[in-house]
Amino acid sequence: MIRSTTLVAVAVLLAALPAAADAQDKAQLLDLDLELQEIRFASLADEVLTFYDAERRRQSASIFGFLALSWTDRVTGSSEAEADADFPHRLLLADGHVIRGRFGGVDDKGRVIWTTRHFGTLPVKLDAISAFRKPVPAAPAAPPETKPTSPPDKVPPDEAPVKPKAEAQQAPPAPAQVKIHVHEHGRAAGNVAVAEGVVAEVRAGQVVIKGLGGRRVIQPPDAQQVALQPPPPPATEDDQPAPAERPLPRLALAGSEGSESDEVELANGDRLVGFVDVLQPGALVLDQDGRNLEIAWDRIAAVTLANPARRKPGDWVSLSDGSEIRFADAALDSEVLSGRVFGNKTLVELEAGLVRRIDFATDYEIRPLQRLRPTQSSGGLVFGVPMPPRHQGDALYLHAPLTLRYRLPAGVVRLRGLAAMDESAGDWGDLVLKIRDGQGELLTQRLNRRTPEVAVNLRPRDRDLVLELDDATNGPVRDRLWLREAFILVKRPR
């Protein structure tokens, strides 16, 4: 006979099997059609996802069939909030990394020292940085009824303007010259100053110099410094302007969507635009049209370089502190995330609860629609009151009547979002949403109290996208619409 205790144990085991999925984390999978699937996550290893589907069936699938895996029910704990105070800023790198941490100065090699909670202290080269912010020392409070000791004709040190580096030893003005921006992939890598009369063309990362009887090709990063040497001038009484040398302190890194100027935000809110030549332990050197300004670090609040951030292919992990890190050989279970980071050089292990999202961005890239800047071709005025589009978080607020035109990036394959009437629309709100590309209509949907929202999941046939709102019954009264979680899927070039 089988003992009753054995039967009870077997019954308990069998009862626990269907509920195994309940022990896993609730998550969402985003597939290549931009459709979300509710799952319970089990593990990730060797590029294979293991999870339980809506029917609690255990599934295993390659990550290449999905775009992203996210956890929406995880909240930031108190310890993480305290850590944010210790590491208050984010360092944005040109390869797409976002690293939460704290500015720790600049070393003697011109590298930014960035102290992090999860990855230790990182030295980062200038040409790898897109932007960072740093703490600014608080201005000491002036003692009451204390008169300044500085002579009237002198400016106190904390109010002194930024002085040119070695101003007293500046060379006399050079002859009139033409500045040429050296590019690679559209990214300004430096300036070459040449004599007037020279023509420059940018071709696939090369600068072709023509003029003064000669032709010269500059191809970064083959040379850190370029000296243009035109042929000897003809024997005339007119002097030929001398060629000039200009170092190329930074090389091309990323795409063509960024500015060609660097920007330094000062502690008082002023902004200086130029080209950051070098970082020093005590100061940053900014080139403004050949005039070097040396700015002490305690006067700087933020630095934005002309290195637009562009993610490289790979598995990108978003952490609870806002960091976004590219992992190689990522493995994740209910307890630990492990993998190699920063060029596969460092093996790290983190608590699984820190993970908020994983983007499997090997062949595709997900871009928020709000990163694109549309042109408003009509509308934006309601009963004489301006009602322009505005961004709020990841949502776009619109008011009919309105027409927006977008120029989509090359390789776009999908557009996804949720269009929903504003809660205040009530019985009055009634509008028609139209979305079309250059070849015709993609979506037409009337939205009102009966149909307050519509899911948008479209396949644009070209790069022209038009979003139009027309008022219906009652005119444009409370015709307010939110476009939430709107993003596009872009196929990476091979």
Image (cartoon, helix red, strand yellow):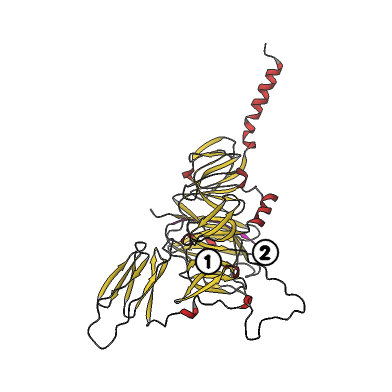
Amino acid type, label 2: Ala
- How many numbered markers are drawn? 2
**Left or right: where 371 falls relative to 385:** left
Residue 40 horizontal/vertical position (percent): 60, 40
Q: Is disc 1 surrounded by few (<14), some (14 to 19) or many (20+) residues within 10 Å? A: many
Residue 62 horizontal/vertical position (percent): 48, 40
**Left or right: where 179 falls relative to 232:** right
Q: Which residue is mark 1?
A: 304
Residue 317 horizontal/vertical position (percent): 54, 49
Q: Is disc 2 surrounded by few (<14), some (14 to 19) or many (20+) residues within 10 Å? A: some
Q: Is residue 93 above or below residue 363?
A: below
Amino acid type, label 1: Thr
**Quadrant of the rendered structure where residue 155 is?**
bottom right
**Which residue is located at x 64 percent, y 26 percent?**
14
**Which residue is located at x 67 percent, y 13 percent?**
2
Q: Which of the two residues, 35 or 184, is positioned nearer the viewer here? A: 184
| Residue 383 in sight from this viewpoint | no
Residue 483 horizontal/vertical position (percent): 58, 60
Magenta stretch encompasses residue 411: yes
Whole-angstrom CA distance, mark 2 to mark 1, is: 41 Å
Residue range in magenta is 408-426
